[in-house]
Image: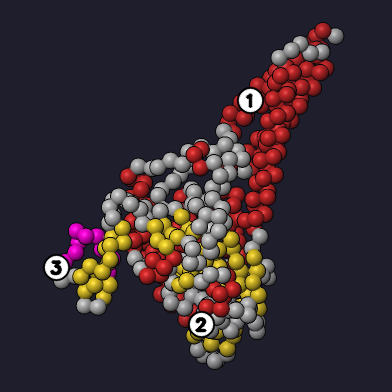
Amino acid sequence: MKEPKAIFIAILMYLLVFADVCYCDTFTSRQSKEVLHGYFTARPSSPQASQPEGGQISVYTQEKGALNLNPGEWEITRDRQGRNNKVVVVPVDDMIMFEIETAAFEQAIAAASDEGPLLIIVEIDTPGGRTDLAQRMCAAITQTATCDVIAFIKGGQYGGAISAGAAVALACNKIYMANNTVIGAATLVTLSKVEAGGRGKERSYREIIGEKYSSVWRAYLASLAQQNKRPGLLARAMVDSSIEVIEVNQSGKRAFIEPVNKRPEQQVVRTWNKSGSLVTLTAEEAVGCTIADGLVNSREELLRQLEVGDANVVIDKAIASAKREWDIVKRRVNEIRKSLDLKAKQSRYPQPAPKFLGILRGARSDFEEFKKLAQKYPDLHVDIEEVEEILNSINAAYENALRETKRRR
């Protein structure tokens, strides 16, 4: 097994070699001049492909299928020639609130990037939600080193990328916005309590966090912005209403700073927000301050602008499927609760021994199913230990009732 230092050096070399060409598609052997067309993958492209050794990368080529290449032995050119002529669209069009949907998003991004599409487009229309889940979504995007990920803030019910949705957009390589949309107001929100089936009940979970966590969130948004050459201060001001942002010009160069840092030779071009208000940008403003990269009013217009107008568009269904699964789970949980309520009412009155034993067996069965659902779906926010205690109580009551029934016989 390789020493940790050797593994670290191999990873570092990979990052240095591919920092600017990680989406490239044509591989030319430095020695034999053999030319292959394909794309990088995050994992072996087929079950038959071996795991890459230290310093190697996994690629899928049109000529030879799945391969592991040594990056030092190949010249890399970004030209899309080896990629599949398709664009994968991943919709984010509701509150960022449930782990089941976040997991589906993570899986969708990873799976799409390994299919070698020309682009992945994250279509956003969300009022935000849980920032812990948004960070997982951002990580799924930023860790996708094999394909460009484009945010399209499309407009709709919520009107843009608000709060945690702004973070998801900032994580993408480029941001395009429809004319009637906004981005910003990224106040930190975490989960306090969500009732099962509480989609859309913002009051049940909104909790503004203290300065310690808000500071971390500010820095996080700033880093997301800066990694794609966007103004980090504007991203911070989306979180912190005490930050005032002005745009200044000095010798033809623009900069975004706080008023306290303005130098005499700098000319104020614009005040982007006043202290006391979070930065929320219209589409035109976002393009004007380089938070966004362009205005488009439809997916088709976006595809033309990105020069992939003839690509096959594939809408990823993972999140929609997760929503349907979650709705089924909520309905089943409600059915179990109603069943338990009925059994609780029946148990308050004297019952013949066989019927009472049947009630307890039914309650045990309901709680066992409920426990399995709670273990599988964290979004139910159920205390498993409490469920187990109730199950133990039911089992004890059942055994006592069974012994009493046998004694009376």
Which labelled disc corresponds to residue 264?
3
- Decide which of 197, 12 is in the foreground and name it: 197
Q: Which residue is drawn at the image coordinates 48% and 48% (left, top)?
A: 130
Q: Which residue is drawn at the image coordinates 44% and 46% (left, top)?
A: 189
Q: For the residue carrying disc 1, how many other residues have a C-alpha within 10 Å: few (<14), some (14-19), or many (20+)?
A: some
The verdict on residue 256 being magenta is: yes
- Decide which of 70, 172 is in the foreground and name it: 172
Compared with residue 228, is residue 346 higher up or lower down, i.e. above or below?
above
Q: Secondary structure at mark 3?
A: loop
Identify the coloring: secondary structure
Amino acid type, mark 2:
Arg
Q: Position of residue 401 (x, y in %)?
A: 75, 15
Give whichever of discs 2 and 1 has the lower sequence position. 2
Instruction: Measure the alpha-carbon separation of dots 3 and 2.
Output: 45 Å
Would you say 368 lies left or right of 215 here? right
Compared with residue 22, is residue 380 higher up or lower down, i.e. above or below?
above
Residue 248 image-quadrant placement = bottom left
Q: Secondary structure at mark 2?
A: loop
Amino acid type, mark 1:
Ile
Q: Secondary structure at mark 1?
A: helix
Amino acid type, mark 3:
Pro
Q: Which residues are magenta?
A: 255-264
Q: Position of residue 183 (x, y in %)?
A: 44, 60
Q: Which residue is drawn at the image coordinates 59% and 63% (left, top)?
A: 90
Which labelled disc corresponds to residue 78?
2
Instruction: Measure the alpha-carbon separation of dots 1 and 3.
Output: 71 Å
Residue identifier under label 1? 390
The verdict on residue 226 being magenta is: no
Would you say 190 lies left or right of 195 here? left
